Amino acid sequence: MKKFTPVIKARGFATQQSKRLSEKTLKKSQVASIFFAEVADVFLFITVLIKETFSRDFEFKEFFRQCFHIGYKSLPLVSVTGAIMGLVLTIQSRPVLVDFGAVSLLPGMVTVSIIREMGPVITALICAGKVGSGMGAELGSMKVTEQIEAMEVSSINPMRYLVVTRVLAATLMIPILILYADALGILGGWAGANIKGNVSFVLFFSQAFASISFVDFLPAVAKSFFFGAVIGLVGCYKGYNAGRGTASVGVAANSAVVLASLLVIVIDLIAVQISDMIL
Amino acid sequence: MTTPSPNKIHRTEAVVEINNLSKSFDNQPVLNDVCLQLFKGENLVVLGKSGSGKSVLIKCIVRLLNPDGGSIHVLGQDITSVNRDELNDLRKKIGFLFQSGALYDSMTVKQNMEFHLKRIKKNLTKKEIKEKIAEVLENVGLPEALNKMPAQLSGGMRKRISLARTIVVDPQIMLYDEPTTGLDPVTSDEISTLINQVQEKYKTSSIIITHDIACARTNANRVVMLQNGKIYMEGSIEMFEKSEDAIIKPFFI
Ligand SMILES: Nc1ncnc2c1ncn2[C@@H]1O[C@H](COP(=O)(O)OP(=O)(O)OP(=O)(O)O)[C@@H](O)[C@H]1O
Ligand SMILES: [Mg+2]
């Protein structure tokens, strides 16, 4: 008969096993074993998550609610950052290009930097702060106040209801937010170009789009999905595994932001290497 | 006030059977060789000092915590070796009232109750769900709370709503973790009576953890006392009340 280990307990279980192991061996190995227990735990979390994603009863209602929450509620923040990003980038690059007599390259340069790098990374970092901490705090407080246990005890799968919906919603909505921020960034760039110079909207955009190609676009979109997934995953993992007591809600939210931001940067590095190799 | 009638209980049929259960946290034993049975149709009151592991005990029964040793049979099935689907089916038959209430903060009272009802009883119509929720809210004396958020309720109201959420799915076994703690004497009494009515009406078997002796008097068919991770004493409420034991006496003053 298949034995079932609930996910919440799996963490404790893994840690317990490794603790027993470390008692037998040297004390030095304790840190390492706790680390490996954590890694095993993350692995288990992702395995269960993937399994639950393809289960029969998908929680559509909660999924759409989360999409609305992550997407729509982040719009003001992403709009402002996106526009300012383009504006500042243009203002900063302009003098250098003027020195080289290459000011006509301004729209293209700004657009390429926004689409390839600035848009995805800055938006993802902003979302790691907003969405990641939100999930960490929400699930963390649900854990601490036994709401997750209440679901489990009523045979509602909290992994399916809470985590799958949130991770998928983040994976879907954050790339959309990134594209939206890109668009506003280019608009901001046009505004920036008009502070000192005089470029028509049509000219700016025809130059902008002439300079970007599919090769700029595809890797950027691909990595956006990974940013979204990792933000959702880290936020949920940290919240879902919050400890006991209200203090751990703060810890969960905080470590979700820190880890998600770090992973966004690391994924960006890897994505750059890969797209450099392939394209 | 209704009085419990012990003669109705079939002492032979145990719905929950716990043998030599032990559980420790970080090498700190909390439960140590606990043996306990809950018989069909019975209200079993569990007494014990704060931190004696009462909540841990009932969490082991629904496998929110994995026992370190011993066995737990619920409705004849060994809860530690069932697979996931079987566990879910068992859990649908068990109502669990959390000490903290555990209401879903992001949902209204109505949504809280629907959330469980729709998922546990899949074949109810919209009208039946609505009527059921109204009936249970009436029973806990809070029909006006239907569209409120948990944050808008007082502590005692939250407690009553979570009781309502637990009984709305008609479980066969009820595990109440301090149902009356923090309530005024009048409400407390109403809740105790309600617990009794639930037992009578739906023939549930319940484990009631409480410090409230009035509640124990109203409901208990049998009482056990948990102390240092073991069952310290077991018997009728009268036996406990007459006891001169230094550990038991302070509970009954
Ligand atoms: N998940 C857990 N992790 C670590 N320790 C725990 C956990 N749950 C309970 N404990 C410990 O187990 C002991 C018993 O806790 P429990 O909540 O069962 O007490 P209780 O009898 O319900 O007390 P109260 O009447 O105050 O609710 C406590 O010392 C507590 O610190
Ligand atoms: Mg308790």
Image (spheres, coloured by chain):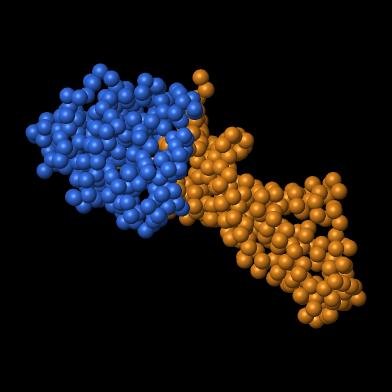
Is residue B2 left or right of A162 when viewed as pictured?
left
Q: Residue at x 62, y 57 (%)?
A: A71
Is residue B235 left or right of B128 when viewed as pictured?
left
Q: Which chain is orange?
A: A
Q: Quadrant of residue B169?
A: top left
Q: Which chain is blue?
A: B
Q: Quadrant of residue A60?
A: top right
- On-image quarter of the N terminus of chain B: top left
**Does A177 appear above or below B244?**
below
In this rendering, does residue B81 appear at all?
yes
In this rendering, does residue A265 appear at all?
no
Q: Residue at x 80, y 67 (%)?
A: A110
> How far across and how far down the image is residue B11, in percent?
23, 20
- On-image quarter of the C terminus of chain B: top left
> How far across and how far down the image is residue B84, in percent?
49, 28
> How far across and how far down the image is residue A174, in percent?
66, 54
- The answer to which of A223 and A92 lies nearer the viewer is A223
Is residue B53 left or right of B66 when viewed as pictured?
left
- The answer to which of A14 and A177 lies nearer the viewer is A177
Q: Quadrant of residue A57?
A: top right
- The answer to which of A238 and A33 lies nearer the viewer is A238
